[in-house]
Amino acid sequence: MTRRHDVKHYPGLGPLVALFFVYLYAPLAIVVIYSFNANRIVGVWTGFSLEWYASALNNRALMNALKTSLTVAGVATVVATTIALLAALAIIRGRNVRFRKLSETVVNLPLLLPEIVLAVASLIFFSLIGLQNGMMKLIIAHSAFCTPFAFLPIRARLQGMSLDFEEASADLYASRWTTFRRVTLPLIFPGVFSGAMLAFLISMDDFITSNLLSTGGTTTLPVYIFSLIRSGTSPELNAIGTLLIVASLILATVALAVAARGARNND
Amino acid sequence: MSDSALHNPPLDRPHRPRPWHNLPFWGLLPTWVLMGFALLVPVVIVAAVSVATRGTHGGFTWDFNLASYRQILFNEGWTGEMEFTPQYLMIIARTFVLAGATTLICLIFAVPVAYFIARQTAGTKAVLIYLVTLPFWVSMILRVYAWMIILGRGGPLPRFLESFGLPPGTSFMFNDFATLTAMVYTYMPLMVLPVFASIEKLDVTLIEAAHDLYANRWTTVRKVILPLTAPGIVSGAILVFVPSLGAVLEPTLMGGGKQMMMGSLIQLQFGGGRNWPFGAAIAMTLMCFVVIFLIFTAHRAARKGDVA
């Protein structure tokens, strides 16, 4: 049967898909290309230059914002992943769980409601209880909305896992803690790892919540970038953008690769 | 029988330690504490603030008042008479139109792309899905910013069209189309992935059967492919439509100050605008729309499930 007569072949699909991938990557490529532009005006190309990378790396406000973002994302990732791991264990492995469905909905709630509503809610709540520490506010809010992103891969991993290994371990008189540490945790590690990576990326990426909660001393990276965009596009902004694009592509690749390897081993 | 019994067959040998019998309580306690503190209680407080009274210097006082909801529809004139003002209704309408258009455009592109990817060999499929997912992990603000460069004055798109006679110095920024462009771009992967998942499960022999019965390609798409991939399309539509309703960055950066959506209007009330009760009222309205939409789709899915 020739391709022309193959009923599953739809004409024009190949070029359309090719165009689709150009559409996905061209905007990112444009930020990268313009970051090497020597000219101060973004749209006017005068020559290749690394000067904007030097100025980005010497930008103290940028480095402070990066430090704030990394601190918040680091702590939020640990908190969110721990809470998500406990919740997934309880929901999948626990017996006679009361409110199982409700609890699962609550874990996933940050995915269901618009982020701006949650951001406003945190802002009002923190101001009512008089929480002043900007870092603390960011960490609590970020931990909450990162939890479902850590929860979903861990849950998927736990659900696909047979109980045999854990039962074998218990038959050999391993204590519960030993079984968890030596059997369960290594088996679900790919899920925990990709969950943690996703939580980290989501926290680093967040703008809406951070923008409402951040105060003078605690500006996160996306909030800082927003203020740069507001003051007009600049080649330095493109250099910062390129560094971030490269960093997130590498992190996401590692997270997805670990998740894919875990899924294969699971089969 | 409950599903917990299915996951954990009863272990009756007495010597074996029962694994984590108090796990459900201690495992879920941190979740409830965190979500309660960061989310559940605060949302209830937002509901309370939306019916509070605006303070004179920003902030609010706890006096029951529906003025914030009234403000969505009416403007109080100098003499205290209520005058209907459509400005906020316009913003709500724009929010729905843009979110709906985003969902529709994402769907139109996602179905053929997902269909193409699903028909590749396992290796190619994995690579293509990876390539669809990847841009999603780049910071949203950078993905929107990229479009500011492309559409802005002196950017690649105006430049390109200027060589075809467009007046120089044209900018495509600060209108609803710019907002829509950025929204479609930022939410596209959320549509492709679920649609792909359901097309992949589609039985190819059904498509061949349709052709054997003399259906042409278009009829096959309409009568076989689309109905059978409906679950993926519905979940993709939810994943795109819900965050689109709450979009903040796209209207703020691409739409400019005038072309607001509900998300950017809320943000304004807690920033420069400083009208917390009004911001809370808009936030509650937005949340109600989302919850109604989610309940509606869940209900429909449940009813479809009963019939099948």
Image: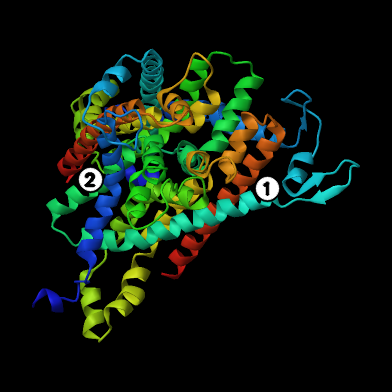
Can residue B200 be seen? no
Q: Chain of mark 2?
A: B
Q: Quadrant of residue A130?
A: top right
- Indicate the quadrant where residue A13 lies: bottom left
Identify which amino acid the numbered label 2 is placed on. Answer: Tyr
Classed neighbour count for the residue bearing mark 1: other residues with Cα under 10 Å, few (<14), some (14–19), many (≥20) = some
Horizontally, residue B196 falls left or right of residue B244, namely left
Q: Do dots 2 and 1 share one subunit? A: yes
Q: Residues within 10 Å of mark 2 (few under 14, many from 20)?
A: some
Amino acid at pointer 1: Tyr
Residue farthest toward the left in the current orientation of the protein: A1
- Rendering coords of residue B260 (x, y %): 58, 44
The residue nearer to you, when weighing B249 against A158, is: B249
Residue B88 image label: 1
Residue to which mark 2 is pinned: B130
Task: Work out whether residue A197 or residue A35 is closer to the camera in this orientation and state it.
Answer: A35
Residue in view at x 52 percent, y 21 percent: A214
Residue name at image x 25 percent, y 52 percent? A21
Residue at the limit of the structure toward the bottom, as seen here: B214
Q: Where residue A48 appears, x then y in whole percent?
A: 21, 30
